[in-house]
Amino acid sequence: MMVFTRDLRTSDNPALVEAWKGIGKPTMLFVLDEKLLERPNLSSKRLRFLSEALHDLDRSLGLLGASLVVRKGDWSSEVLVEAVAVGASDIHVSDDFSAYATSRFQRLEAEGVGRGIRVHRHPGVSVVPPDLLQPAGGGGYKVFTPYFRRWSSTQWRSVELPLHPRGGSAQGPKEIKVIENIQFLEALAESSSNDSITGGETAGQERLSDWLDTGIENYGLVRDRPEEDATSRFSAYLHFGCLSPLEVAVAVSEQPDSEEFLRQLAWRDFFLQVLAHRPDASFNNFRERGNLWNQDSESLHAWATGMTGFPLVDAGMRQLEHEGFMHNRCRMVTASFLVKDLNQDWRLGANHFMRHLIDGDVASNQLGWQWVAGTGTDTNPHRILNPIRQSERFDPKGAYIRRWIPELAEVDSPEIHDPSPEVRQKSGYPDQIVDHHEAIAHHRAMRAT
């Protein structure tokens, strides 16, 4: 039996390949985990993407002569119920590394033993499995640069060949079995729409093909410029496994000037291996810095709603709410502003991002926030991103700001990066809620180490 989790694809899916080798047509299962659905930081846009991805997966499985079963409830219990119902003795699943994912696997394995059911975990959610690379002293890498050197020189596994339909001919797409469960998911996502992105392997492969043709050539030059929108936007497809990280890495590595993008894939793998060795880092400081956080709900609300008076920060937060996506440069700037300028706990920001991001990924999101906060793997815990200087450098003409802050649409650069009091009053754009330099001095005073 094949249990899909964050590997919603038929291409380069080692777990699916092994399940497909068995006799007859294996059962294809996805479980809507009620504990995850009950979390307060659940994004309706992320659920919309998941719904689209499951429908697309079912169509792809139909072309192979199989169909998808969707169950809802306690994850390990529902997997075992289905396995017993179909008489499966082996369960194949892609390995994952958060504390919650690990606990699910361990419970499934323990409960499966008494029923004579074996659980097989396979690679597939990363380019390089987290346990493959170890520093000399063991325990996982804590600094990215030496990890990247090893990652770059390591021989990757081979991309799995496409599957062939059972019996030599496809039977055509079929409807998802247990339709009420997919309808339940769609009802949760009903209030949202993802105008800028469509979920599923089909859309992901199209995006990959288009971006290799037109996007990667200048990636290293413009990836930090939010007005260019020159990032790949693969993140949601990678999070849900609609694209194989390895397949993307191999395709990109065959292009000239690919190192900068490969570096981003390596960061994703790096954070996964950090989480594999320190599962608590998704909610605890990776490194304690003695921060004394503010508890100012008004400034937190201003940040969350894009009303801080700092245009690049506000533009990023408004893009997040509207699209369920934010440019990576803006993610760093908005995170730095919350933690360093407003002296707010990074967990508040990470949870807010998870409530909105389609690509909300525990490893990349939580550890990315910790990197900015100085409590994570960054070797410089005192890094400060000045929101005005960042705006002038990476959005020099103000195009990104004008797109997301219509109040400032008629303001010319360079004033758009820090509008005058007169412009703010006339346009209805708020004053700065803090003085950047005073706020940074206060933040440093509130940090014990």
Image (tube, rainbow, N blue to C red):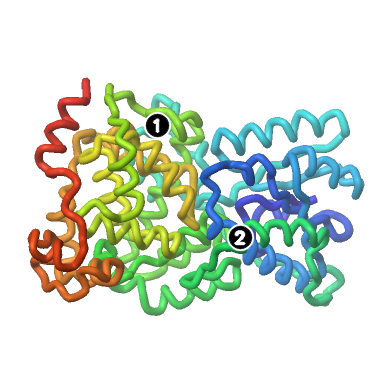
The residue depicted at 45 percent of the width and 46 percent of the height is 269
Quick check: 64 left or right of 215?
right
Above or below: residue 137 compared with residue 399: above
Please tell me which residue lies in front, 4 or 292: 292
Amino acid type, mark 2: Ala
Residue 401, x across and y down, in percent: 24, 66
Above or below: residue 105 compared with residue 87: above
Above or below: residue 132 compared with residue 200: above
Rate crowding at label 2 as few (under 14), some (14 to 19) or many (20 or more) other CA atoms within 10 Å: some
Rendered-image quadrant of the C terminus? top left
Residue 385, x across and y down, in percent: 19, 47
Q: Where does label 1 land, which residue?
A: 135
Mark sitting on residue 189: 2
Above or below: residue 402 compared with residue 357: below
The residue depicted at 72 percent of the width and 31 percent of the height is 107
Q: Is residue 246 visible?
A: no
Amino acid type, mark 1: Pro
Per the image, label 1 sits on a secondary structure element best described as loop
The residue depicted at 64 percent of the width and 47 percent of the height is 94
